[in-house]
Amino acid sequence: MSSTIEVLPGRAASIAVAGEAGGAMVCDKHSLAGSVTQRACVFCGSRVVLYPIADALHVVHGPIGCAAYTWDIRGAQSSGPQLHRNSFSTDMQEMDVIYGGEKKLERALMELIEKHQPKAAFVYSTCIVGVIGDDVTAVCKKVEAAKGIPVLSVASEGFKGTKKDGYRAACEAVYTLIGTGDTKSIGPLSINLLGDFNIAGETWIIRDYFKRMGIEVVATITGDGRVDDIRRCHGAKLNLVQCAGSMTHLAKKMKEDHNIPFLKVSFFGLEDMSAALYDTAKFFGDEQLMDKAKEVVRDEIGKFYPQLRVYKEKLIGKKAAIYVGGAFKAFSLVRALRTLGMTTSIVGTQTGDKDDYAQLREMCDAGTVIVDDSNPLELAKFCLEKDVDLFIGGVKERPIAYKLGIGFCDHNHERKEALAGFVGMFNFAKEVYASCCSPVWNYVPRRARSQRPEVSGQKSDAESQTEVAS
């Protein structure tokens, strides 16, 4: 079956194999036409970053289809306002395209701001807006003057580039808020969390770790975010950047303009979560802070590691495929899978750069296929060739896995279970085990009959699951 799937010639330079000679991968460019890429558009990249700001109004200026990202589709949670969970749209029709949609946008903003009283409003330009040339910035300035709140234009026309360009547009928009708030009450041990979006409440987990260490989190940009916190976040002493692809641009601007250094970290997996706490304590140069960091790590690992060892016994030798948005998550997942005794056979990202892929080639086992901006045919081909047991991806990859008879783990923004932090690693292990070791995979056509437990004499996955549960 796999022999009938071929890689498009134009894609060959964007695929590499760990342990084999070769130059830098071709990446960070527009998707190859006809490949039906898994990558998202500029608009998607911008809304991923900005939507979790919970007390802001988010208005999509474009057709109603672009506003599908609404209530409960995304797992970003809020401890207070729920306004971000509504995706408002100007619902542009044919007449709006012909005569322009500026007046319609102005009316929508005036009505929505009056009704919901947000702290700020973000207006997202879509493809059609870029085509017809609506002056969204001018409309935003007019409404801002009339309503007295920041009304920010996000230059996110989908066709302008890739998801990565959407990240940059979001950073530019949110940066206009930074530096406009009072920082007098911010202490010397203070940080901002950049690039965590509070999927399934993960920001709350991470904030608690730092609170136990005695570190103040001034703002989370943007998970469970608040406009007023973002306004004053320039008073923090350090920025921790988790999603490097989406937030490095913002961190660099804050370093240049406000002299705030930043560290790139990850909160996924035992190793990376521990390193994030240790690196933060090391930055502040406080021995007591380092002792508290060690205490948090010791307590959390002691709580979850015994059960992780049980899962590892059942997962050793299993193979996984990874396809995620940013490279930071791919690095962490490779390490997390090793913690569980699994190997990574395929790893790819939507927004990685040459340095990211060079690092993946170094850290992955020989023979691991590494891909940039992949498409369904490529992913299916490599999954079949490597005979993987698990696919870790997002909503677009789920059908690929299930059609091939492969277990699936959702590690994207739609999920409802926390996978960050120490408890997140436990949740991840539990989900990976349940997906990989489900007895249903013994009966998919791609599995040889000899691999079935009733034929080979091996202990069935159903029996193994019963043991783990007990």
Image: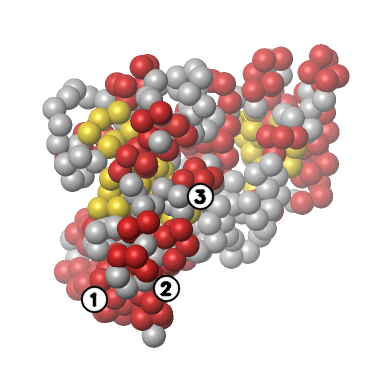
Q: Position of residue 46 (x, y in %)?
A: 54, 36
**Please, which colouring scheme is shown?**
secondary structure
| Residue ID for mark 3 | 402
The amino acid beneath tag 3 is: Tyr
Residue picked out by circle 2: 462
Neighbour class for label 3 at 10 Å: few (<14), some, many (≥20)? Answer: some
| Label 1: how many Cα within 10 Å (few below 14, some 14–19, many 20+) | few
Disc 3 is placed on an element classified as helix
Q: Residue at x 41, y 80 (%)?
A: 466
Say which quadrant the C terminus sits in.
Answer: bottom left
| Disc number for residue 298 | 1
Q: Are marks 1 and 2 in contact (CB under 8 Å)?
A: no
Q: How many marks?
A: 3
Q: At label 2, which amino acid type do we have?
A: Ala
Question: Which of pointers 3 and 1 lies earlier in the amino acid sequence?
Answer: 1
Q: Specify few, some or many for label 2: CA neighbours under 10 Å numbering under 14, 14-19, or 20 or more.
A: few
Could you give the CA–CA distance between mark 2 and mark 3, rounded to whole angstroms? 19 Å
Relative to 435, does residue 57 appear above or below in the rendering? above
Query: Considering the image in quadrants, where does the N terminus appear?
Result: top left
Judging depth in this view, the residue of 433 and 207 nearest the camera is 433
